[in-house]
Amino acid sequence: MESVSRAAVKIDIERSEIREFLFPPLGDNDGLLKVEASGVGGSDPEMYRRENTAPCIMGHENVGTVARIGDAAAQRWGLRAGDRIALHEYLPCWHCHWCRQGDFRLCMEADFFNVKDRFNTLRYGTCNADIPPHLWGGFSEYMYLAPNAVIHKIPADMDARLATLAVPLGNGVQWAVLDGGAGLGKTVLVFGPGQQGLSCALAAKQAGALTVIIAGMTRDRTRLDLSLSLGADIAVDVQQEDLAAVVMRATGGMGVDVVVDTTGDPDGKIAEQAVALSAKGAWLSLNGLSASVPLGEIKKRYLTVRAPRGHSYRAVQMALDILASGKWPAEKLCSHDFPLEQVHEAILATAGRGIEGAIHVTVSPHKS
Ligand SMILES: [Zn+2]
C-alpha cells in the first residue's frame, strides 16, 4: 500500500499546486480515508479567493473508503477497512453544551462565528495544512480520519459523486424541511437555482410540499429547466418575469409558507422581497449578512426568520437516504468531475468561470 498522499494545496489567492504528504502515524482512535470524490462547495470559490488561508487542502464534501483504522475507532464508529463513508466538514469537540445536545454545528470549537482564528481551527477543507497530520481536506488522495469526525456509512454500490451531494442536499433538508417546515400542503419559494437551491427544492418536494417555486436569473436557464425534474413546480427567471405576480398567482394571493434564500442576498434586496411574498405565519431562511428586515413587517405577518447555518446529522442522513432511494435524478446535479491536477479549474467552474453550466462539481483524486 502507498505511504504518500498527493494533495492539491491552495498556496496563495486562487493558486494551487500538487504536494506530497507522508501518511501520518495512526493510533487506536483515528484512521485514514482513501478519498473517492470530494464535492466543490458553494462557499469554496470565496474560500479560494480569501487572503491568508494558505496553505490549505480544500475539499469539505468528502466521500471515500476507509483505508486504515485503529481498533478503538473501528469499534466506536462500527467501521472496518473497506467500508465507505461520507463525512461532515465539522470536527466538533463532542463535550460542549451544544455537542451534548447533538447540535455540533454550534460547537464552541467548530462554529466559525465563535472561533477567534478560523484558519487554525480544525475543520475539513478550510484549515491550515501546516497543522499535523496535514491531510485535512478532500482534494487529496487520502484524508485523515480524526477521532472527532462526523461520519455516515454509505451503501457499497452508491456512486461516489452522487454521495458527495450528502452535504448540499443535507443543507436543503435542513433549511427547507427541518428548519422551515416545508411539508404536506406547504408552498415554498427558493431563491437561487445553484446546488443549494436545487437541493432545497428537491427536499421540500420530497417532504410533500404542494408548490415549490424556484427563482433565478437569465444566466441560470439550464439550472431553472433542470429544477423542474428535481422537485420544483415553477421556475422563474426574475429578469424576464415578475416574480411577485407568479408567486401570488400560484398561491391564490396568499404568499408562500416557506422562503429559503441560497444566494447570500448580495444586493440586500432578497430579504425585503421574501417578506413581501410571505403568507402570514411564514418561515423565512434569510442569508444576507448585511441585509435588514423590517421588524414591523415581521410582526404584521407573524413571521419566523432564521438564517441557514449548515446541517445536522439527521439532515445529512436523510439526504443520503433520499439519494440512495433513486427516486430523483439527483445525478443530474453532478455536472463536472475533475482530477486532482485540475482542482483550480474545478473551483473556478463552480463560480461560473472557465466552464459553462457547472452545478455540482467534484474532484476525484484517484482519476487520471
Ligand atoms: Zn462542542
Image (spheres, rainbow, N blue to C red):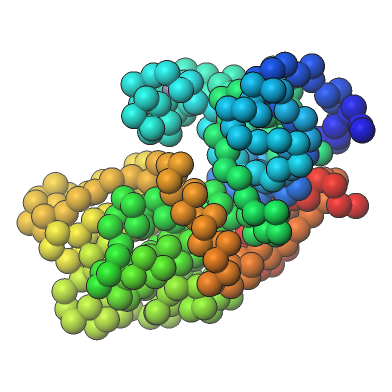
Image vertical order of residue 354 relative to residue 288, above or below:
below
Q: Which of the image's four quarters has the N terminus?
A: top right
View quadrant of ligand 1? top left
Q: Is residue 344 above or below residue 232?
A: above
Q: Residue furthest left?
A: 300
Question: Taking 32 as reference, is 292 left or right?
Answer: left
Q: Name above or below for residue 291 compared with residue 157.
A: above
Q: Is residue 206 visible?
A: yes
> Is 301 positioned to the left or the right of 5 in the image?
left
Q: Is residue 227 left or right of residue 256?
A: right
Residue 348, percent from left and from top: 69, 52
Residue at 62% of width from left, 50% of height from top? 154
Rendered location of residue 293, percent (x, y): 22, 49
Asked if residue 20 shows in the view, the reply is no
Q: Nearer the viewer, residue 268 or 30?
A: 30
Q: Is residue 291 left or right of residue 248?
A: right
In the rendering, at what x and y percent does residue 136 appear? 68, 29
